[in-house]
Structure formats: C-alpha cells, structure tokens
Image (cartoon, coloured by chain):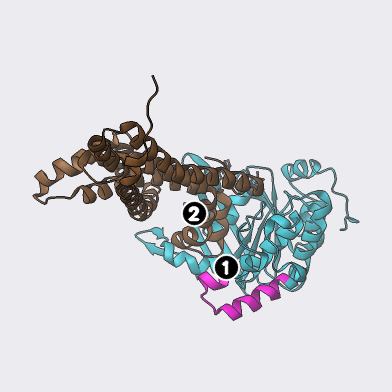
Chain colours: A cyan, B brown
Amino acid sequence: MGEVLRVENLHKSFGPNHVLKGIDLTVEKGQAVVLIGASGSGKSTLLRCVNFMEIPSDGRVWLNGEAVGRERNGKTEYREHSLIPIRTHVGMVFQHFNLFPHMTARQNVMEGPRTVLRLTRATCVKRAEKYLAKVGLSDKFDAYPAHLSGGQQQRVAIARALAMEPQLMLFDEVTSALDPELVGEVLRTLKDLASEGMTMVVVTHELGFAYSVADKVVFLHEGRIHEQGTPDEILVRPSQTRTRDFLRGHATFRLPEAQF
Amino acid sequence: MGYEWDFAVVLRDSDLLLLGLVNTLKVTILALVFGVPLGLGAALLRLSSNRLVRGLVGFLIEFFRSTPPIVQLFWFFFALPLLTGIEISPFGASVLTFSIQSSAFFAEVFRGGIVSIERGQWDAAKAIGMTRNQTLARIILPQAVTRMIPAFLERVIELMKTTTLVATVSYADLLYQANNIAQSTFRPLEVYTVAAVMYFAVLFPTSLGVRRLERHLARSGATTAH
Ligand SMILES: Nc1ncnc2c1ncn2[C@@H]1O[C@H](COP(=O)(O)OP(=O)(O)OP(=O)(O)O)[C@@H](O)[C@H]1O
Ligand SMILES: [Mg+2]
C-alpha cells in the first residue's frame, strides 16, 4: 500500500509561539487516522500545514511520494501557485462548515470543480449532484445553506470537498458545532467514507467514533506526538500518563459498546 | 406684510432649471461611474499584503476624506492647469474632483464590506484551491456587496448634495442655474424654493428606497449595518 501522506520533523511557529515541535507522521492509502489532543495542542495547525493553508516553519511534507515545495539553499520554498494543486488534492472540512451562503448546495459543491479545475458546467453539475447524493442530500440541491440544518450544512461541506476528488481528506472537529442530535448523521457519513477506502485524517473528540473507525489514533500533546497506535493501544490501554489524563476528561466515552 | 408669491417667472425659466438638474445628475452619475471602480481598486490595494502600497493608498484615501471638497474642486480647476498647462472645463474639473473624492469614500465602504466577511469564507475557498482573486470575485465581494448597499446609497445621496459645489466654478448645475435666474428675475424666494423641491424630489425617494432596502436586508440577515 502506498503512502499518501508523510510528514517529517514538521515545525510551525506563529511569531514567538512555537506550536508544532517536530511532527513525524505517515498515513497509508485507505487509512483513517484520528488525531486527538487537548485544546491548543496544535491539531488544527497540523491539518492546516498538511494542505498548506499554513506554511510550515520547518520540516517536510510528502503527498503521494512527492515532496511539497522546493529545496533552496537548505530552506524549503513554497510558491503560492504551486500550492494550489496540493490543496485540490487534499480536501478539508471545518468545524463551522463555512458554506458559501450566497450559493445553493449544488453551487457550493460545483464551485471548486468549476472555478479551480475548470471542468465544463455539465460535468460540474453532475459531479455536484453525485456527491450531494452520496452524503444523502439528493433532495436539497437547490437549498441555500440558511435553510439547512447544521448536520445538512456539514454534509454539503463534505460533498464540496469530495467533489474535488481528493486523495486525502482532513476533518477538523466537524461535529463540534452541531447539536447533539445532529452529530450522528455526520459521523455516519465519515464512517461510510472510511469504509469505502477514503484516506483521511480526522480531528475529533468523539472517541467512540475514533475507536470504531480509526486504523491509527495519534495523541498530540503540546505540539508533539505523545503516543500513537491502534485504537485499543491508545484509547483502552494508553501507556502514557498524559494520554490517560486526557482520556479521563472524556467521561462520556464508554468502551467498547460506544455506537451511533 | 404679505409677500406676493409669483411662480410664473420661475415656470418661464423651468427649462433652464431642468437643464441644471440634468447637469447635476450628469456629474453625479459620472462621478459614480468612475468613483465606484476606483474605490474598489483603492479598497483592494488598501487590503494588499504589501505594507508600502497599503500605507500609501490609506494615506490618499484619508487625504481626500479629510479635506473640504470645495478646496479639492478649486485645486483641480484653478491649480492643476497651472501645473500641467492643460486647461480644464468646469465640467471636467467637477467630474474629476467628485470621481476621486467619492472613490475615497467608496473605498472605505468596500473595505468595510470586505473585512466584514468571516475568515472561514476565505479558508473554505482556499481549501478547494481558489486563488485570492478568485475568492474575492466569487465568494467575498458578492456577499460584501449585499451588505454594503445601504452604506453605498447613503454615499450616493451625500455625493449628489455635495455636487452643488460645482456652481462655484460656473458649471451650469441646478444650483448655478437657480442663482442666475434668481438674479435676473429678482425672485430668489420662488427660484430657490423650486430648486430645493427639485433636489428633494430626487433625493427623498432615494432615501426612502434606502431605508426600505435596509429594513429588507436586516430582515434577511444579509446586512451587518454600517
Ligand atoms: N493563525 C494563527 N496565528 C497565531 N496563532 C495561531 C494561529 N493559529 C493557531 N495559533 C495558535 O496555535 C496554537 C494551537 O492552535 P490550534 O488551533 O492548532 O490548536 P487545536 O489543537 O486545534 O485546539 P482546539 O482543540 O481548541 O481546536 C494556539 O496557541 C493558537 O493560539
Ligand atoms: Mg482546532
């Protein structure tokens, strides 16, 4: 199985704030990796460095075996126009959906294929409808985001990312902004994607989901990977005290019957 | 002591007043045609990542917002020809002044609209590979413009009122025509009353329209006020 993502010694600082302190991570094709960690540990920053929404301060990222950026005098250079194809190959879904409110569900999903990939209108319409159907929204093509529930909006956002037909999907706490009764429908969508073989990195506090879907769980602590392994190793028998402390904070997490 | 109102003299010259109104509208509309795109350009430069560009454009905008429009008009009409050696007509000076002057205000309206759009919209567009310009054109501006409409129309009304200054450089706008007729007929009361009513007849419906639009946008949640 090929390696879709490889991150080596990744550092990211915002001014004096050293957020990521040397991350090494690989994601194999078809794997679902779940990233857990306390608030501020750098989970979002790590995801944003993977699709180059943020430029890493140091270290290297490989996508499908190809290094991103160019080596120049010992520094890695990233040119904005060379990062566009990277972002089209790596989909990202956000906590707050960030749908385009002036566009219908279909237009939201078409936007990337149309404006960025420059596919024909007809192709884009077909793609949009295909991916909206995939997330269970065949009846909402013409709905504006304001008329959709949070769970539906998040599924449109997932369809919008899928319509680029990315090789890797990043999910950043995509259920954290949802009412509890809407969490299930979004997690189910993610679970379906994982079982279809989509390669993904998921930041989530839904540990039941992590347990049943993840191939690998990564615990991030203060900008470093503190512990990683199978869901059993990390969520049930963590070897590190910090991981145990973190898990104890999630009282609602019951094993192994956690279902949705 | 009753004053004998006599609108007959004014009505006789009503074509001159109408011509004045048309000239006023001409300056206003041309100032908009040039001022709005110029304002958008200035707003985008003011949001540029280049510190120098940002600073320079910011200074120019503040300069035109913080000097009296009549001084700007005199400068373009009397001073600029000395500098360039090119004579400029009252009409040309008026359009030039108000295009630039209003663009400074529109720049602020545009900037306010653009920065009012949440960061998440930029993020979402970037994440699907859109460039900064694509994001501006397809995601940010369409949303910003709806939010800007009330502030924008408010400026249009302001602009039309300010154009009365062009009478001072002998451009035959409504006020200039009214001055002339008042002097030749010795009927300033009637003449200026009619002129005021004519301004009102154009501006009041516009104002009402703005207010209705504002209420409508507020209801639909598209505006964040201004
Ligand atoms: N654009 C930015 N500019 C400056 N600092 C930032 C920026 N983005 C993140 N940070 C800082 O980086 C640190 C890590 O933030 P990050 O959002 O990656 O954490 P997180 O693990 O995702 O937390 P949460 O669970 O709250 O989402 C925080 O201290 C944050 O203030
Ligand atoms: Mg986060």
Q: What stretch is highlighted in magenta?
A: A112-132
The quarter in which the N terminus of chain A is drawn is bottom right
Q: Residue furthest top?
A: B1
The secondary element bearing badge 1 is classed as helix
Q: Residue A56 carries which label?
A: 2
Quick check: marks 1 and 2 in contact, CB under 8 Å? no
Q: Is residue B165 above or below residue A36?
A: above
* Residue A30 place in picture, x, y as percent: 69, 71
Q: Residue A111 carries which label?
A: 1
Asked if residue A115 is among those painted magenta in the image, a careful observer would answer yes
Circle 1 crowding by C-alpha within 10 Å: few under 14, some 14–19, many from 20: many
* Residue B147 place in picture, x, y as percent: 54, 48
Q: Main secondary structure of the magenta part?
A: helix
Amino acid at pointer 2:
Pro
Q: Which residue is drawn at 15% across and 45% down?
A: B80
The secondary element bearing badge 2 is classed as loop
* Residue B197 place in picture, x, y as percent: 42, 39
User: Which of pointers 1 and 2 lies earlier in the amino acid sequence?
Assistant: 2
Circle 2 crowding by C-alpha within 10 Å: few under 14, some 14–19, many from 20: many
Of all chains, the one bearing label 1 is A
Front residue of B116/B197: it is B197
Residue B60, by quadrant, is top left
Q: Can residue A161 be seen in this view?
A: no
